[in-house]
Amino acid sequence: MARARPQSSSSPTLPRKGGGSRKEARAWQRMLSGRRLDLLDPSPLDVEIEDIAHGLARVARWNGQTKGPQIFSVAQHALLVEAIARARVPRLGRPGRLAALLHDAPEYVIGDMISPFKAVIGDSYKAVEARLLAAIHLRFGLPAVLPPDLTKLIKAADRNAAFYEATRLAGFELAEARRFFGRPHPLSGALERDYLTPWPVGTAERRFRERFISLAGA
């Protein structure tokens, strides 16, 4: 009788999408907090706001193609989106504002991929992004999947922010930006001067973390 071949404990395997298996590749990111975040199966227990703030403040929007000596960071973009969401719905509660602030939080580990490239990659990127966002939501007391009306509001605020960033910082003409992002909700002069002037990395990290604390009560 033929013996069953024992599996090697030193060569674990992962399933392939199309069947079969492959040798395990590193799919985790070591954080400065000491956490090790698995990108394919993220645990809320491995998510820390310090890591998110640190990472997002160092990720450039628009692939770095913005005016000025500083990058326009994802952390600053997130704060702008949260401010626009508040302006659109003044009675938006703290959980909704927190969800707006964290809407791009997965980019602290996967970076800010521009929309044209996301379209080329397709569903694989979206699946990883969705799993990371669900883990982040659960870590900070939000539902893994947001209610449809809140998701719609955040997407609208995100497109508004993209319009202002595109026209003020990324060299888009107004007509071109309207075609891609729609007509924006009006932005006050004070908000525009503050949120659309790229901040130093340390400022973006600090302001993101402080806003999180004010919303989460951490």
Image: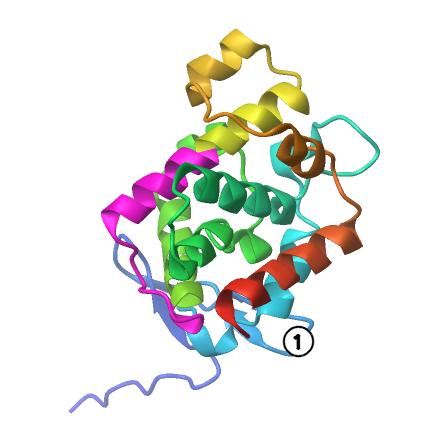
Instruction: Count the marks.
Output: 1
**For the residue carrying disc 1, how many other residues have a C-alpha within 10 Å: few (<14), some (14-19), or many (20+)?**
few
For residue 101, say whether it is visible: yes
Q: Where's the C terminus, which quadrant?
A: bottom right
Q: Which residues are magenta?
A: 138-158
Give left or right: position of 126 versus 190.
left
Secondary structure mostly seen in the magenta stretch: helix
Corner quadrant of residue 22: bottom left
At horizontal 64% and vertical 45% (from top left) the residue drawn is 76
Give left or right: position of 32 versus 29.
right
Q: Amino acid at mark 1?
A: Ser
Residue 167 pos. (x, y %): 61, 19
Residue pointed to by mark 1: 33
Corner quadrant of residue 35: bottom right
Give left or right: position of 12 versus 83.
left
Q: Residue furthest front?
A: 91
For residue 30, say whether it is visible: no
